[in-house]
Image: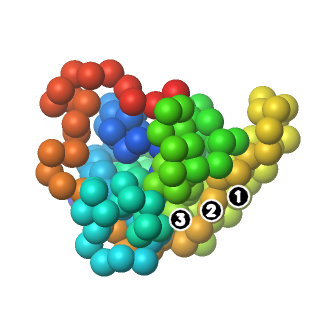
Amino acid sequence: MAKQETATFGGGCFWGVEELYRQVDGVLSTTVGFMGGTVANPSYEDVCTGATGHAEVLQLVYDPAKVSYEELLKKFWENHNPTTLNQQGPDVGTQYRSVIFYHTPEQKELAEKSKEAQTQSGKWKNPVVTEIVPAAPFWKAEEYHQQYLKKHGLGSCHV
């Protein structure tokens, strides 16, 4: 069996983030949910209040022989605005913050290097505000949120 690793990203509405990664060769599974808050097993409605401290995230399992963590980070930076604090497009609140939850010291190092590269790139007129923090308990969102855009064919819900 191939080696498997886990990555967790928050870049706005988790439906769009999931759809981006679901189609990447080497991504074995995707699950949307919540991480980084103070409430155990929150519901989507709980998180939407902004009171739980959770971010909407995508947790994925990938085969590092087929797709590197660096490639996953590249996709993360390319597909959301990391300079808007607690907002992606029309979605506003701490649950939509730009955040990388690292699972290993190597992921932390790679995420920090990639953030620095984004900061130095000149691509963004405002500072990159993406958080890079240790992975916390992951709470799976309700089933109707899983692969939502694939099921409903609504396109992307992010900028």
Residue drawn at (59%, 68%) of the image: 133
Which of the two labelled residues, at mark 3 and mark 2, occupies the earlier sequence position?
A: 3
Q: Earlier in the sequence, mark 1 or mark 3?
A: 3
Q: Is residue 13 above or below residue 122?
A: below
User: What is the secondary structure assignment of the residue under circle 3?
Assistant: strand
- Marks 1/3 in contact by CB < 8 Å: the verdict is no
- CB contact under 8 Å: marks 3 and 2: yes
- Tags 2 and 1 in contact by the CB under 8 Å rule? yes
Identify the residue under disc 1. Answer: 112
Residue 69 vs residue 124, the one in the foreground: 124
Q: Based on the displayed image, in which of its 4 quarters is residue 46 positioned?
A: bottom left
Give the residue displayed 56% in from the left and 43% down from the top. Answer: 87
Q: Report the disc number at residue 153.
A: none
Residue at which label 3 appears: 102
Q: Quadrant of the N terminus?
A: bottom left
Which amino acid is tagged 1?
Glu
Residue 138 position, x and y percent, is 34, 68
Residue at point 38% right, 26% down?
A: 156
Identified by mark 3, the residue type is Tyr
Badge 1 element: helix
**Where 155 falls versus 85 (above or below)?**
above
Relative side of 90 to 126, left or right = left
Measure the alpha-carbon separation of dots 1 and 3.
Answer: 10 Å
Residue beneath label 2, please?
132
Would you place residue 107 above or below residue 15 in this image?
below
- Decide: few, some or many residues near mark 1? Use Cα within 10 Å; few <14, some 14-19, many ≥20: some
Look at 59% across and 32% down and name the residue there.
78
For marks 2 and 1, the one nearer the N-term is 1
The quarter holding residue 125 reads top right
Q: Between marks 2 and 1, how big is the CA–CA gap?
A: 7 Å
> Mark 2: which amino acid?
Ile
Q: Horizontally, is 31 left or right of 35 in the view?
A: left
